[in-house]
Amino acid sequence: MTKKIALAAVTAISLGFTAVAPASASFGGGGFSPTTPPPEPVPEPLTILGSLAVGGGIVAKKIADAKKG
């Protein structure tokens, strides 16, 4: 029950923050000058972890199949 309440609170806070803060907001105070190239996009951590989990599962299955046969 408390996990659901905490999840609802965090969701409400994050949705409220994204509604207030524009996508171009600079919170670190470090804007980009015209001579500075924009940063390269970085994959989300869950994407990386999911890819590693799927790859690890495939490798584990191949090892298990090799031991059987």
Image (cartoon, rainbow, N blue to C red):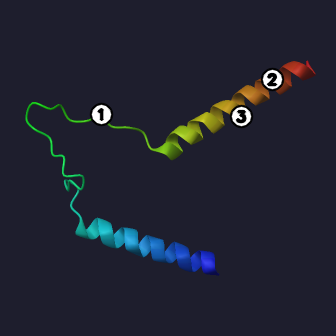
Q: Position of residue 40 (x, y in %)?
A: 29, 33
Rendered view: 37 above or below 32: above
Rendered residue at 50%/76% (across/down): 8
Is residue 35 or residue 14 the one in the foreground? 35
Q: Position of residue 24 (x, y in %)?
A: 19, 53
Q: Nearer the viewer, mark 1 or mark 3?
A: 1
- Which mark identifies residue 40? 1
Is residue 30 or residue 9 the one in the foreground? 30
Chain-order first, disc 2 or disc 1 = 1
Chain-order first, disc 1 or disc 3 = 1
Rendered view: 6 above or below 33: below
Q: Helix or strand or loop: what does disc 3 sit on? A: helix
Q: CA distance from mark 2 to mark 3?
A: 10 Å
Residue 52 falls in image quadrant: top right
Identity of the residue furthest to the front in this view: 29
Chain-order first, disc 2 or disc 3 = 3
Q: Helix or strand or loop: what does disc 1 sit on? A: loop
Identity of the residue furthest to the left in this view: 34
Rendered view: 53 above or below 27: above
Residue 33 falls in image quadrant: top left
Q: Helix or strand or loop: what does disc 2 sit on? A: helix
Rendered residue at 20%/53% (across/down): 26
Q: CA distance from mark 1 to mark 3?
A: 30 Å
**Circle 3 residue:** 57
Callouts 2 and 3 close, C-beta under 8 Å: no
The residue carrying pointer 3 sits among few (fewer than 14), some (14 to 19) or many (20 or more) residues within 10 Å by Cα, namely few
- In the picture provided, is 60 more to the left or to the right than 27? right
**Circle 2 residue:** 63
- In the picture provided, is 35 more to the left or to the right than 37? left
